[in-house]
Image (cartoon, helix red, strand yellow):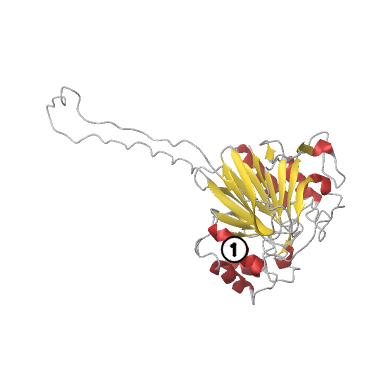
Amino acid sequence: MPTALLAVALTVTGCGSGSERSGGDGPGGPPPTTAEGPSPAVSPPPAASPPPAESFTFAAAGDLGANRRTARSLAALDRSPAEFFLALGDLDYDETESDAAWCDYVRDRLPAKGAEFPFQLLAGNHEADTGRDGRVRRHAACLDDRLGVEGAYPTQYAFSYPAENPVARFVMVSPALTVDGHSYDYRRGTPDRAWLVDQLRRARDAGQWVVVGMHMMCLSMGEDHSGCDSGRAVHGLVLRHGADLLLVGHNHLYERSKQLALSGACPRVRPRFGSACVADRGKDGAYARGAGTVQVTAGRFGGRPSAVDPDDPDRRWFVTSRADTAGFLEVEVSADRLDARYVPTTGDVQDAFVIE
């Protein structure tokens, strides 16, 4: 499996603003005064907006566990420039004594990042209401939100980054999962769909990069989950509203897709390949911003080994798909460019791409 460097770092560039004030007497000195009186009130100049940060980096992966692979990935994350991490569901696999013990396991292995590092969670099927490996609410009680998100952490939420002068919007959803009795449904007429559409439109209207994360996927070459587990409704929404990057887990492998876009010639993406849905084949690792959506499956931060099905009907949607690796995606984003690379912690997978 090619060592995919899918670390995406987000770099924000911009110009700072400032104001100058000059004071002092003119060449002839101050004008004469005939009487003393109170000095006129002087309003301070308006505070200048701080310039945007030059860049930021984040990392993401799903299917974590608590084993030797997990420890290696956490060590690599601790060394990385990532300012936050998106855990894309399927968290502890019951490899620790309790959900709270898994939180301690994670924190103990991120000494350089420190206790305040945003290790942001998203629900997976293993810790949803019908899951067999704990409950995501208990995980979220000890790995709580550190970014001030909008919505319902850790199931359906959004945030812009950086907090001042943001250039990217992150929208996290939980299709096909039931958590705390609520089944997340993105079909027409549902509140979840209305929330997601609003978030995607707001990000586009603000001119921000749009990154969507969810545990389940609709397209994948993984042997374990070969169908559209997320449901086609949410997948179609993400493509229709032109998300730049779609991050998923669930299948224990690394994949990068072609750039997909809906249009009159391609009203929806089906398992049967249709070239009209492809904006860019992605073989050179370079995509045009605004042309469509690139999916990355970063589904093995530490999970057990899986396999790629070379005969999967989804295979033609992907540039690369490898299961012989564990690791995470690292992304660097600027106002006009997104650089991503896969960071392998086992295996020799190498992959990188840019959207600009």
* In-front residue for pair 245/186: 245
- The image shows residue 185 at horizontal and vertical percentages of 76, 54
Residue drawn 70% across the image and 70% down it: 93
Q: Can residue 66 be seen by looking at this rendering?
A: no
| SS category of the residue bearing label 1 | helix
Is residue 132 rendered to the left or right of residue 72?
right
- The image shows residue 44 at horizontal and vertical percentages of 32, 38
Q: Residues within 10 Å of mark 1 (few under 14, many from 20)?
A: many
Tag 1 residue: 74
Picture quarter with the C terminus = top right
State whether residue 206 is above or below residue 58. above
Is residue 31 rendered to the left or right of residue 194?
left
Residue drawn 62% across the image and 62% down it: 73
State whether residue 343 is above or below residue 20. below
- The image shows residue 124 at horizontal and vertical percentages of 71, 62
Farthest bottom residue?
A: 97
Farthest left residue?
A: 34
Farthest top residue?
A: 28
Q: What's the amino acid at mark 1?
A: Leu
Farthest front residue?
A: 348
State whether residue 310 is above or below residue 239. below
Q: Can you tell which quarter of the image residue 258 is in?
A: top right
- The image shows residue 240 at horizontal and vertical percentages of 74, 40
Q: Can you tell which quarter of the image residue 153 is in?
A: bottom right
State whether residue 64 is above or below residue 9. below
Picture quarter with the N terminus = bottom right
